Image (cartoon, rainbow, N blue to C red):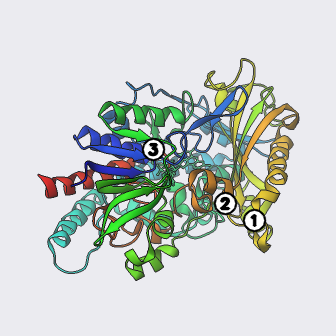
Amino acid sequence: MAELDAVIIGAGHNGLTCAAYLAMAGLKVKLVERRKTVGGAAVTEEFHPGFRNSVAAYTVSLLNPQVIADLKLGEHGLRIVERRAQNFLPAPDGSYLLTGEGRTQDSIARLSAKDVAAYDTFTTELEAIADVLRKLVLRAPPNLVDGFTLSAVGEAFNALGTANIMRGLSLDDKRILLDLMTRSAGEMLDERFESDLVKALFGFDAIVGNYASPYTPGSAYVMLHHAFGEVNGRKGVWGHAIGGMGAITQAMAAAARAHGAEIETDAAVSEVIVEGGRAVGVALTDGRAIRAGAIVSNLNPKLLYTRLIPADALPEKFITRMQRWRSGSGTFRMNVALSALPSFTALPDEGDHLSSGIILAPSLPYMERAYDDARAHGWSRKPVVEMLIPSTLDDTLAPAGRHVASLFCQHVAPELPGGKSWDEHRDEVADLMIATVDRYAPGFAQSVLGRQALTPLDLEREFGLLGGDIFHGALTLNQLFSARPMLGHADYRGPLKGLYHCGSGAHPGGGVTGAPGHNAAKVILRDHRGVFV
Ligand SMILES: Cc1cc2nc3c(=O)[nH]c(=O)nc-3n(C[C@H](O)[C@H](O)[C@H](O)COP(=O)(O)OP(=O)(O)OC[C@H]3O[C@@H](n4cnc5c(N)ncnc54)[C@H](O)[C@@H]3O)c2cc1C
């Protein structure tokens, strides 16, 4: 029998969460992580001498409060603060929208009197739906299984439980939910609002990490996905982890270690060892083999199944379908070291807007053109940029008087057309992103002391995010809920006995949530007890 109860491939935040729950339940767990640091896409690193930032994921809201409480992340040093304002959207004509407690309505009223009431109605509708869907986040979705087996009966009860939760929605809310699951954000926003900036505020959430136009059917779901969050009990709000996103994963690692989990970094898995149709261990690139009762993958499922498991060990139809898993965000991520804070033409003085998510994308048609351009050219020559300056809330990131900013840029093609390589175009596109900010805040380019630019290819190489997909696979209806990562495998179990999924490629999908890790641990514990107790 294996000495370990579980080995987890990858120490992203979900691998760490899963390890912590398993270790808390008394299992002997080991994590093996390819990078030198734990955290996956939620890490803080020095990107320029003296300047640290959240390198990939950069803002907190989706992290599940239950996970924060169970893992006692506060006791392990995690502190999350709210932004002083939520979002700032400047327009080229000098107008702007600034949202946050006590200011949203006034700011909208300056753009459109009609949109004030429409905003209240829409956010109330979204909140009612998010409230109910939040109850599904920490549950395995109903899994579809063939035949009338014991597990089919169990899944029927699970489906009843899910249906019961959905009864919490009124018929009207169910109708809106249907729209949100199937329609484009653009259509829904055009029906409700008249101001371009108000539409852009919501529309940005529909295209973040989603290589699509806001008018692509299904984009409304991505908008809803970004509404599930909360910060310190305040729903729908976004915040900042002091010390950056790495503070979250360092606290998770401390929680896992406190309960006995072993974490090894600089330890890449080259293959999952399969014997007699069962996953029994992992082979590392340094030649070692580690055997365990459960093999748990924190990786994008396509990466796991197409690169780490021999195709002949998997059912043919399963692997054919997995090769079609849609994975590729249109994102380009930059970290910049700044000598001074930017001054925006629309709101030049320093103020709370500089601690908010600054969205440079003044309308839905602008976002659609960005997508079309990226499809044709490889990147949008008028891109969408969200800028966050976390050093306005956190003095641990930059030297006194200096600042760091995250630029989250959309739309670029996951793979460049015409055989072009991202390695040849990284600097050109990075210059374009800086110039884009400079158009709204003249002088910004001059204030840049250093920069790090991550193309989709870099995100794949550095973090194992295939096609730079920030969610481990698109959040489209055919890749969500009971279909994540595939119908018949929504229960966190892979197609081989002993193999489990605990990463963002499982329900409820991407974002720094901890939810897939939590849900996978529950299933692994159930199986563990069934087998060994
Ligand atoms: C640029 C960017 C910006 C984002 N912004 C936000 C944001 O602001 N807020 C938010 O909530 N979410 C954001 N996200 C999404 C979020 O970060 C991810 O969905 C989430 O962190 C994924 O967590 P995970 O634990 O499932 O997987 P990952 O973090 O991807 O972890 C997987 C781990 O597996 C390791 N690994 C890969 N291959 C191997 C191998 N062969 N052997 C061993 N280990 C291996 C990887 O190194 C990695 O550490 C962003 C993502 C990106 C990329």
Label for residue 487? none
* 3D distance between C-alphas at marks 1 and 2: 8 Å
Circle 1: element type? helix
Q: Determine whether the beta carbon of the residue marked 1 sits less than 8 angstroms from the nearest atom of ligand 1.
A: no
Tell me which residue sits at (51%, 59%) in the image: 472
Circle 3: element type? helix
Give the residue pinned by disc 1.
374
Q: Give whichever of 363, 451 is nearer the camera.
A: 451
> Badge 3: how crowded within 10 Å, few (<14), some, or many (20+)?
many
Q: Give whichever of 349, 279 is nearer the camera.
A: 279
> Badge 1: how crowded within 10 Å, few (<14), some, or many (20+)?
many
Label for residue 330? 2
- Give the amino acid at mark 2: Gly
Give the residue pinned by disc 3.
13
Q: Determine whether the beta carbon of the residue marked 3 sits less than 8 angstroms from the nearest atom of ligand 1.
A: yes
Left or right: residue 314 versus residue 410 is left
Q: Are marks 1 and 2 in contact (CB under 8 Å)?
A: yes
Left or right: residue 532 versus residue 60 is left
* 3D distance between C-alphas at marks 3 and 2: 22 Å
Tell me which residue sits at (61%, 25%) in the image: 393
Q: Position of residue 531 (x, y in %)?
A: 15, 58
Residue lying at the far front of the rendered structure: 287
